[in-house]
Image (cartoon, rainbow, N blue to C red):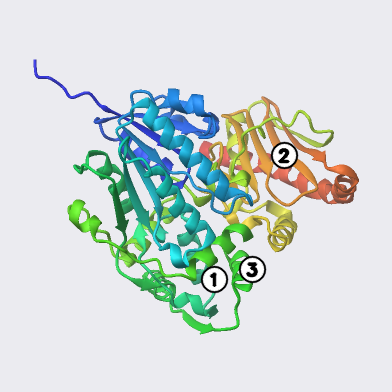
Amino acid sequence: MPETTPAKKIFISGATGYIGRRLTRLLLASAHYDIRILVRNRAKVQQSIADQVDVWEGSTFEKDLLVKSLQGVDTAFYLIHSMGSDKDYQQLDRLSAENFRDACIEAGVRRVVYLGGLGVKQNASKHLLSRIETGEILSARPECIQTIWLRAGVIIGSGSASFEIIRNLTQKLPLMITPLWVRTQTQPIGVDDVLAYLESSISLTHPDDLVVDIGSEQLSFQQMMQQAAATMGLKRKLIPVPVLSPRLSSYWLILFTPIPYKLAAALVEGLKSETILQNDNAARYYSDIHPLPFRETVRRAMDELEQNYVISRWCDSSGQKACDIKDFDDPTGAILRDIRVVGYQHGEKQVSVFQAACSIGGPNGWFRYDILWRLRGLMDKLIGGYGLNRGRRQDKELRVGDALDFWKVADIKPGKRLLLYAQMKLPGQAWLEFDVQPEQLVQTAHFIPRGLLGRLYWYAILPIHYFVFTDLAKTIVKAAREEDDKIMYK
């Protein structure tokens, strides 16, 4: 019998982030790899792949667990960074990278592949500088382990932060007064090409450490906006002016895009400096990969949106505190509750009510009092929160960890329970729970107030709750009934 080559064991950290989700799916499609992933919350692993991967729950700050999880691994991907995170993110990034490198060495890993950002230290933003330092730390011991350091600029794909900014601004504003940094040069790259470079790095034949800058044609942010508009069949006018400071630019972005203030500020800071290729190693060592032109990456991203096939979004990452729902999936400690119960006939389908609950928000809106929800979302945006225009990944499907306007999906029990954790700015913690029982929907708003202000906030909005939450529960049941009727009479 012919001998078969054993599958290489591949380790992916940050596996529930924007790139990590897509890379995991790509590698699973090949019979050449045995995939192991590290996640902070195993509930965020998509059910369709959970039984195909070896899931380890933990973080890069748990040294012993990290060493154990890396045993037998050939290639380890490091896809972790702290864009828009806490004030001490730089120190956390350093510690995380050091732990990962040392654990890989101790476990006998052959190669580390890291995805960082384009740029040079002399004029790099704080966040880009941290990503450069991460690459230097991972590759600091070449005598013990090999590091392939890929560096990308603006990544274009459905759900990426950069694409969300470009798409929202282009579609919403026919005339834009823009800061001068829109003329800064960069080299964007499509997410599919990034994934191709990552996968090829597993089998790349090269004896030493390697830094590989990847990107397509050189463009300014202004040119990207204009080309994106043309791809969408729109005409847009951009007028750069010198009076828009980075702070004002960040506020401009949060009003018209789904990006919150901290992330917008970090992106704007990075856009002030050129991010162009510093070497030709991509062409030399990955000659079979030819990055798509910017317009084609935009077209593909738009196609995915229109086909409702968005695999991952910028806010999937567990690296950002506000994007993770670990330890937030149980509201039993709440001391204030607003409960709405809506019955339905036994003949009506419980699964239809559950599906209707999973369809709220995003482009589907919040029913009769949608204007009040949007007003609350605008207030949240103005004070640095997510607001409502973060939307949702797909129109009807939800999974644990998905963003839903200013909520995050904390738990799902198919056909029975949907639990949303509030990520709006609040004087406390809040959840919205849908308990779908055989003959009734029990909708509960849970709240843990923070001090006196939290209690005052709760009782001040109770009158609004009466209208908004009553309408929400009733309309969910009504929508389920109408959907059942459509199916019955087809």
Mark 1, other Cα within 10 Å: few <14 / some 14–19 / many ≥20: few
Depth check: give the residue in front, 111 or 261: 111
Query: Looking at the picture, how far across and down is residue 350, in whole percent?
Result: 62, 29
Mark 2, other Cα within 10 Å: few <14 / some 14–19 / many ≥20: many
**Mark 3 is on which residue type?**
Tyr
| Residue closest to the far top | 1
Task: Give the residue at x 54% y 49%.
Answer: 82
Disc 3 and disc 2 in contact, CB within 8 angstroms: no
Depth check: give the residue in front, 189 or 143: 143
The residue pinned by badge 3 equals 251
Task: Give the residue at x 29% y 35%.
Answer: 29
Depth check: give the residue in front, 382 or 230: 382
In the image, residue 38 above or below residue 285: above
Numbered circle sitting on residue 172: 1
Query: Looking at the picture, how far across and down is residue 119, in whole percent?
Result: 40, 62
Task: Give the residue at x 58% y 29%.
Answer: 415
The residue pinned by badge 2 equals 431
Q: Using the rendered image of the protein, determine whether residue 370 is visible from the camera's viewpoint.
A: yes
**Mark 1 is on which residue type?**
Lys
Report the Cα–Cα distance between label 1 and label 3: 16 Å
